[in-house]
Image: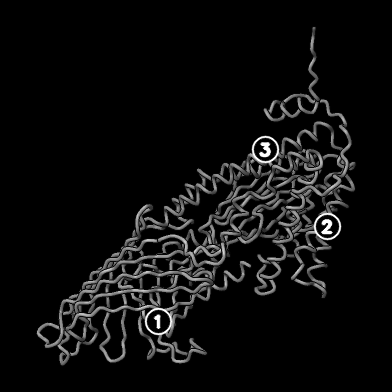
Amino acid sequence: MRKSIRIPAHIIVLSLCSSNVSFAQQETMGTPLTPPAQTPAVVEAAARNIAHTIIGRKSAFDASHDPQDDPHGYFGAHSDKIAIFALAAATDPQRAQTVDYVPKYIAAAETARTDKEVSASSKAPGTTSVVDKPGIPYLLGLAIDSGAVTKSVTNSTLNLSTSPYALVASVQGDTAETYQRFSDFTRIGIAAAFNIQNSQDPLASVQRKNLSELSVKVRLFGDHSPRSPSAQRAFAKTVLPALQTKADTLTRALADLLRRGEGVRVVASFSANANSKINDYLDSTSYDGSHAEQDLEKLIISAVQTDIYGHLDSFELTSADQARLSVFLTQYKASTDEYDEAAKRFDIFVKELQQKPTLTLAYFQERTQGSSEYSVAKLMFEKKPASFMQIDANGSASFYNRPDPTKNQQTFRDVTLAIGFQQNLGRSPFAMSTADQSRISLTLSGNYERLPENRHVAGKKADLAVANLKLEVPLAGGVSFPISVSYANATELIKESEVRGSFGITFDLDKLRSLVLAH
Amino acid sequence: MKQTDTGHYDVGAGEKVTITIQAHQVAEDLAVSLDGNALQPTGQNPAVYSFNAASGLPAQFIDIACHFSSSDPDSAFYQFSIRGSQGGGDFNASSIRKQDSDWEAVLQFTLP
């Protein structure tokens, strides 16, 4: 008894396409495509994705008027992609359900934006930490976002910081070109702290008489940023091949399939019509941000139904073309999965790079009311071992600018050594939102200071030591509860040991804002 | 060259198309593809890509796939501009921001 197995023609074509075998294919008209009874999930996801971006851009553009935020015309550079996905989903609905329109890594990036930990400044008055961290306004994170100078207010202190790179970037733009030419300028950070006289107008306190500290920091170790040469080598090796494959997969499908029949004209018409409607909607007087995303999503889906699914015959897709669309979905999924993995590996590399030890040389000029001005030269080391606590170590020497002999002062003021260990203890149980990833931290630090002017002075000690244990528990919404205990064998003024406990509530307005925006 | 919208351009046969991509607050972490094949940059900082519009093809497709690491600032973005050798000027061809929900843009170049 002889059995025969029938293999559908499109499966044969599919397997040949998948293995990239070149052959003379008989291009026959396949079963005519019909519009899906329901909008495919991948098309809905695409419409939702595009609508979300356009509305996000509109909000930003209304505030900034920066060209990169302009939502008008955004659709034009995304219409071909949604068109090819619409065709593929009509051809192979089941396979289309397995494909992400946007890689998971990119979708997750949006969530992560609201998860960033925003730590309170270690320079806040009343801080119980005895170790300075080498946090130069290390450009990328601080100064550039706000332009040439970064401003922050902590309690009654106004902090202004900048760097030579921030100044250059504020004029030339913080582009790859600027960074390539001036990245060494990121090594230097300059900051000034002023006592605020008028809390309603902190900037009015920027006067010499209110200057409490001036600092210049120079990063001695190399560039550990995502733009550093080592990060770029890792990107080229890790992410670029996957990113290229994803891009090639998309343009191959576009070139193979939209050039058919009237495909180019149909898609151009779809793009122009939808773009025009989107722009009209964005500029209409009845625009309402509360349901704009949903409105735009419907508008885009309607455009796909009318201008793509309403003209399926115009694409003149053969059975081989339909098989290619299935192959496209398979290959696109494979390429996005590969990209997701590569992007995660690169993130890990960059994080490890950023946790490499940093060594910073700093100069401070301290001005405190009632005492002589002095300058401090400090060497600061920070290391964040992957599986151990963060270590900060400082060594410094200070010098009076104009020593006062009546106070037993000489040019040399003091020498100080400090070390601190910080351990994260996991996510705060008080965090109300999943977007809030604030962590409890425990810090143990110690400080030794040799202050010669106290020698042979009754009631004072020349050797001063402080030990401190601090627990900081983030509460909900950018509020945290620090509690600390410190022991000092003496202070600069009194030769008596003391044990001091302190606690309080700190507010991080930036973090509060980011959490509000996340909802 | 004539711009229909930010993703669609009419070009002349053999016209040299130049795409300039300016990376802001991010390295040039991107890949560009033309009709299924990698398009190599002809310049860096800023990244420049060019090709000649092929006669005999109704359209050619460029995909600009950008990447942002989780450590790049949220305000990072890539800005694209396009120029054709047969005139028409420089065209602003959209941008990709880290805050966008998709990090690739497709450009179509059509022979009328």
Q: Quadrant of the C terminus of chain A?
A: bottom right
- Residue underneath mark 1: A193
| Element type at mark 2 | helix
| Quarter of the rendering containing residue A419 | bottom left
Mark 2 burial class by Cα count in 10 Å: few <14, some 14-19, many 20+: many
Q: Nearer the viewer, residue A365 or A331?
A: A331
> Image quadrant for the N terminus of chain A?
top right
Q: Nearer the viewer, residue A225 or A481?
A: A481
Residue that label 2 marks:
A272
**Residues marked 1 and 2 touching at CB (< 8 Å):** no
Instruction: Give the alpha-carbon distance from disc 3 to disc 1, as whole Å.
Output: 56 Å
Q: Residue furthest front?
A: A429
Q: In this rendering, is residue A361 above or below A244?
A: below
Amino acid type indicated by mark 1: Ala
Chain under numbered label 3: A
The quarter of the displayed image where residue A518 is located: bottom right
Q: Which label belongs to residue A331?
A: 3
Marks 3 and 2, Cα distance to the nearest angstrom? 29 Å
In the rendered image, residue A417, in percent from the top left (x then y), is placed at: 23, 69
Q: Is residue A187 left or right of residue A511?
A: left
Query: What residue appears at the point 36 percent right and 77 percent down from the top-left corner?
Result: A127
Q: Position of residue A5 (x, y in %)?
A: 79, 17
Q: Nearer the viewer, mark 3 or mark 2?
A: 3
Q: Residues within 10 Å of mark 3 (few under 14, many from 20)?
A: some
Q: Nearer the viewer, residue A434 or A321?
A: A434
Three-letter code, disc 2: Ala
Q: Residue at x 80, y 60 (%)?
A: A275
The chain identifier of the residue carrying mark 2 reads A
Camera-nearest residue between A355 and A48: A48
The numbered mark, 3 or 2, whose residue comes first in the sequence reads 2
Q: Position of residue A482 (x, y in %)?
A: 40, 73
